[in-house]
Image: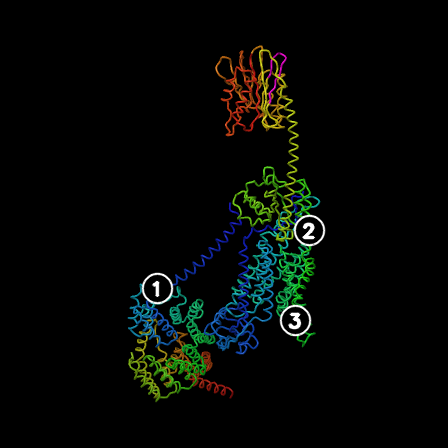
Amino acid sequence: MGEERATSGAAPPPAPAGSGRAWFYAAGLVGLTLAIISIADMFSPRPNDGIVPMPYSRGGIEVRAVETGGPAQISGIRPGDRVVGIWRRLVNTASDASEELLKHRIGETVPYLVSRGGTLLTVPVKLSSVRLGGSTYLYAAGLGFLFFLIGLFVFRHRPDDRAARLFFLLCVLFLLFFVCRLRPASYWWIDVFVQNTGTVSLFLLPAVFLHFFLVFPRPKQLRFARADEWTGESPARWKVLLQDFLSASPGLFYLLYAIPPFVFLYDVFRQVRGEPVSVLSGAPLSSWVLLGDYLVLGLIALAHSAFTLPDARERRQAFHVFVGTILGTAPFVLLGIVLPSAFQIDDYVFWGIVPMILIPLTFAYAIVRFQMLNIRFVVRRTFLYAATTAIVFGFYTLAIATAAKLFAGSRLSSSPIFNFGFFLVAIPLFEFLRRRLQTPLDRLFFRDKLNYQTALLSMSETITGELDLGKIADYLTANIAATMRLEKASLWLRDREGWLERRGRRDDRLSPEAALRRVLRQEGKPALLEELSFHFADSESQEFRERLLQEGFQLLVPLVYRERLMGLLALKEKLSGERFDREDEALLTTLANQSALAIETALLHDEMTRQAEWRRDLEIARDIQASLLPRSVPIVPGFSFLGGSLPAKVVGGDFYDFIPFEDRRLGVVIGDVSGKSVPASLLMVASKEIVYSRAQTTRDPGTLFQESNRRIYSIKRRMFVSLGYFLLDPDAMSLRYAIGGQPLPILLRSGDGGPRFLDAPEHRLPLGAFREVAYDTCELFLRRGDLIFLYTDGFTEAMDEEMNPFGEERLMRSVGSRRDQPLEEIARGLLGDIREHVRGADQYDDMTFLFLRVE
Amino acid sequence: MIKWKTMRKRLVALGAGGLLLAVVGVAAALYFGRAKELTTSSSEAERVFRQALQNERSYYLKEAREGFARALELDPQFAEAMLGLARMTPGDQSLVLVRRAAKERDRLTERERLHVDTQLALREGRRDDALKFAQETHEKYPDDIRAAMMLANHAIEKGDTARAQEIFKELLAVEPNNALAYNSLGYYHAYRGEYDQAMENLRKYQFMAPDQANPYDSLAEVQAYSGHYDEAIANLNQVLKMKPDFFLAYLHMGIAYEGKGDYARAIEAFRRGAREANDDDVRRQHLREAIRVAFVTQDAAQARQLIAEYRAIPGDKNPEITKTVMDALEALLENRPAETERLLRAVAPKIIAAYSEEMAEQKQKVVDDPGWNYLMAQALARQGKTAEAVALCEKLDNPQNTYGSFEQRHWVFSGRALLAELVARQGDLDRAEKLLAENRKWNPSWAPARGSEEVVAQLRREKVLAASK
C-alpha cells in the first residue's frame, strides 16, 4: 500500500503545542524552590535545643529523643518528657515551639516548662547552634537533584510528551521526597512547611511513579477480554469494562491519584479523633505502605513492558530501566518500608535510600544509549569535546611531568618556552585524537542514526530514476516511514488544476489559494505543524492544519520545484519517539528536493503521454463526425437545401442529416449534443441512429421524439441532445416538426414581411434530460418562395471580446437582408456578419445550419 | 463549539482566579473588617491603657490605677479607662466613673458596651443583670477574661467549681496562652483540694509570667495552705524581691509561718503586711490574722498590743462590733469564757446584719460567721458546755460554701481540730481521728491543729493502754 505504516499499540495523543507546559515549569520551579529552602534550612546555623520531637504530638511536645551532648541533654531533658512551654509560652504542637524558638538567639538560655511524671519542671536550656544537614542528608539532596536535573533535561527536550511530562513530575517529587521528607525534623518554622511538602510528595510520588510506568514507553493496553476462540462468543461485559478501565483509562489514573490522599486524610481524621496512628519517619505508616505497594505495582508494569513490547528496541530500553529501577527500589522497599513497618526497625532506612541512585543513573544511561524518552542526545559534540580535552590535557600533564622529571634542575625545564613547546605539540594531537575518538563514539551511540541517514540518501537516488507518479508516491511514503521509523507518512500531490490531493483520499484536498501552500513554498524546508500556527489566517489552511494535528502528524515537508509546490509530505512521530532534529531536517530537505524533481518529471511525462493519447482520440472523433455529416444534400424537386457545420474545437457536438423516405417525404434532423470532443461525437452518432431508426416506423415527429428521448436518456444521463426534426412533405407542401431544445428556426415568407420564428411547439425540452417527456408536433404549410433557416445556438451565442452575443435580432437581420440571394451567398454573408461581430474572438460553440428554400 | 480541553483550561483558569480573588477578598475583609477594640482618639492613651491593663492582670494595682488615670487624662472620653479606674477605686467614686463611661455608650464597640453595662449593673447592685451581660460577653467574646472570671466566681460562690473550670477551659480553647486563666484554674482546683492540678496550672501561670510577682504569690498561697511551707516562703520572698510593695505576699507569708508553727514570724509578717498595705481595710485584714495567731498562741500581751493597733486604724465601718469582739477575745485570753460568751451573744445579731448588708450584692444569705463560731466554741468548751461547742464546731466543719476561698479555710482546719478534741474527750476517738484525717487530707501539717492532734493521740494511747491492761 505505501500510504501508511500501521503500528501496533496506540500511541499517546500528543498534547497540543505548548499546552500546559507552563504548569509543569511552575511545578518544577516550586519544587526546586522548596528544595533549596529546605537545604538552606538544613545547612544554616540556628538555635537548637537538641530535642527530637514526636511528630503530631499535641498538648505539648513529646520528646522522642535528645541529641547526644545537645542542650536538652545537658539541661537534663529526657526522652519521654513532654515540653509544655518555652519562654513564657505554652506550646501545644511542634509548630508552636518552632515559632517560639525563632525569637531567640544562639547561646541564649531559654526556660522550658517540662512535664515529667505528672510534675512540671522549669528547665533552663542554653540554645546551641546546629546545622542539621549531615552527610546523609547531603547524599539524599544530591540524589534528589540528580533526579531533578535528569527530569528537567527530558522535559526540556520533549515538553509536549505526556511520558516526559510525567517523568519530570516524578523527578520533582523524588527531589521533594529526598530533600523535604527524608530530613530530620528541624524544629524550625520552616520544618512544618517543608515537611508537609515532603508529606504531600510522599502521597503524590507513588501515584506518579505508577502512572509513569503505566504510560511508559507507551500506554499499557491489557487484552484479557477476548471472544471465545471456539464459539466466537463475545466476552462478558464486565470483563470488557474492566479491561478498558485498566488499559490506561483516565478513570484508572483518577483512582490512583485519589487513594493516597484519601488514606492520608483518613489517618489525619483518626488522629483528630484521638485514635492511635502509627508513624514512620514523621509520616503515617499507611502512607509508607501505600508507597511500597505503588512502587511494586509500577515495577510490575515496567516488567510487563520489558517483556511484552512489540519493538525489540523498546523492550531493551524498558529492560534496562527495569533492572536499574528494581535494584534501586527493592532495597528501599525492604529496608525503608517493610522492616520499619513490620518489625519497627528503622535503623537501616538510609541504606535503603543509597541504592536509589541507580534509578536516575539508569534513566541517564537509557537516555544516552537508546535516546529513551524521545531524547536526541544533544551532547554529542560536547561529550566528544570533553573526552578529547580530558585525554589531551591528561597526556599533556603527563608529558610535562615526565619532562620535568627528566630535565629536573636544568635551565630548560625552568624556561617558559619549555611549557609552550609542549603546548604546540599538544594542539595537533588534539585534532588527531578527536578524529580517532569520533568513530567509536558514533558506533556506540549513533549507529542507528547513521544507518537511516544512508537509507534516506539511497531513497533520493532511487526516486529520481522513476517516471511513474504512483510508484514514486508509494515508494516515498512506504520507505520514508520504514527508514525513519515513523508511525505514518502521507503524501499530497499536485493535480492538473493545481490542487494538492491526498494520495488515496480524493476528498482531502488543499486549494491553490490556501495560504499554507505559499508559506511552505517560501519556507522550502520541513516545518513543524505546531509552529505554523501564526503564519496564515485563512480558514482552509487552519482547518487543514488542525486536521493534520488531530491525525497526529507533526512535520510537513514541502516538495518544491522551481517555486512550485509539487506535493506535500506529512510525517507522524517517530516510533522511537525522538523529535525531528536538524539532521533529519537537512536530510528530508534533500529528499524533498529530489522528490519534487521526480514528481515534476513524472507529471510532465504523464502530461505528454496524455496529450498524445488525447490527440489520437481527437483524430478518431473527427473521422467519426466527418462520416456522420451528409456528404451531399438531397434533391427534392421544388426545394433547395444548403447545410454546414463549423465545429468550435477540433471535434464538435453538432450535426444535421437528411432521412429520405420512399414516399418522397424527407426527414431533416439538426442537433447539438451537450459536451464536446469524443464523447459528444459518440452520443451524436447514437442519437442520430436512434432518430433514424425511430423515423422508419414513426411518422409523427412528436411521437418520434418521445420514443427517442427514452432511449437517449438510458444511454448517458449526464448528457443530453438538442434536436430539431422536420418532416417535409413536398406533395402536400407541409412541414411537420418537433423541436427539443433547439432554437426555433427562422421563417422568411415570400412577400409576407420580415423574418419570424416558426411557431413554437408546446414542449421543447432537450432529449435525454428526463426519462418521460411529452413532445408535440407542429405543422407549417409551405408556399413558394419560403425560406427556412435551421441553426444551432452557436450562431446566436457567438460572442465578441466583450462577451456580447450575436443574438437573434442580428441573426434575423442578417438572414432577412439576404433572403433573395442564393443560399450560398446567404450563408457566406451570415458567416461574414458573425466574423465581423466576434472580431477574431475564439469560436465559443459549434455552428451548424441548414437552409431550405421552396423554389 | 468550545472544545472540552479549551473549556477545561478556562475552568482551571477561572477556578484559580476565583480562588485568588477569594483569598484576597478574605484578607481584605479581615484587614478592613478588623474591629477596633478600643474606642479612643489617642494612640498614646491606648498604649498607656494597655500597660495599665497588663499591670492590673499582674495585680500591680497601684501601677494599674496610675495607668488608667493617665490614660483618662490623655483621652477624657476613654470609656475603658474609666472602667479600669473604677475597678481600682473604692466606694461611690467608682460608680461615678462607670456612669461617666455609660454616657459614652453610643460611640463604643459592642464589647466595650457590654463591659460598661456589666460594670454599671454590678455597681448599681443589679447582680443578675451583671451576670447576664457577662454571659453575653463570654458567648460573643470567649477570650474576655474579665467576663470569664465573673461567671466563674459566680459559679464558685454557688459551689460549682466544675462550671468555673469549664468556663476557663472554653477561654483557653480560644486563647491558649491566657496566663490569668491558668491562675484562676489553679485556684479553682485548689478550692477542691486538687493540689496537683492546681500546682500544674499555677506553674504554667508562673512560667508564662516569670517577671511578675502574682504568679509566685498565687503558687505560694496554695503551697502555704497545702502544707508546703518552705516552698511557699521561698516563693513569697521571691515576690517581695521582685516587688517589695506587693503587700498580699505578707498575708500569705503569715499563713505559711502559721501553718509551719512559727507564730512569731507569722505575726511579724501580718504586721508588715498591715504596714505596707495601701488600704485601711487591707490593714485591718492583716491585723485580724495577726490577732487570730496571737490567740492561737494564747499570747494575751501580744494580742492586746495587736488589738490596740487594730483599733488605731481609722475608718472602721462597724466600730461597735469590732470593740465587742475584741473585748470578747481579751476576756477569753484572760480565761473569762462566760464573759466572752455574753459579749459574743450580744454582738451576734449585729454581725449578721452587717455581713448581710455586705453580702446583699451577692444575694447570699449570711447565717453565721466562722470567727464568731470559733471563739464561741472555745468559750463554751472552756465552760464545759461541750454539746453546744460541738454543734458550733460542726458548723465550722461544714462551712456554708464547701469550696470557699483559702482565706476562710483556716477556720475550717481550726474548727475541725477543736471538734476532734471535743469528741475525743467525749470518747469518740474514731470520729476524732477521722476529722483529723480529713484535716490532713487538705493540709498534712497545719500547726494550729497540732494541739488537738496531740490530745486525740494521747487519748488514743491511753485507751490502748487501758485496753491492754
Point out the image quarter for the C terminus of chain A. top right
Residue ID for mark 3: A418
Is residue A58 shown left or right of residue B369?
Answer: right
Is residue A502 depicted above or below A845 in this figure? below
Residue ID for mark 2: A454
Magenta stretch in the rendered image? A655-667
Q: Amino acid at mark 2?
A: Thr
Label 3: element kind: helix
Residue A296 falls in image quadrant: bottom right
Residue A768 falls in image quadrant: top right
Residue B93 falls in image quadrant: bottom left
Q: Amino acid at mark 3?
A: Phe
Q: Is any part of residue A552 visible from this angle?
A: no
**Mark 3 Cα-neighbour bin, 10 Å: few <14, some 14–19, many ≥20:** some
The residue that appears at 62% across and 11% down in the rendered structure is A663
Mark nearer the viewer, 2 or 3: 3
Label 2: element kind: helix
Image coordinates of residue B176 in percent, x first then y, are 45, 69
Is residue A644 depicted above or below A237 in this figure? above
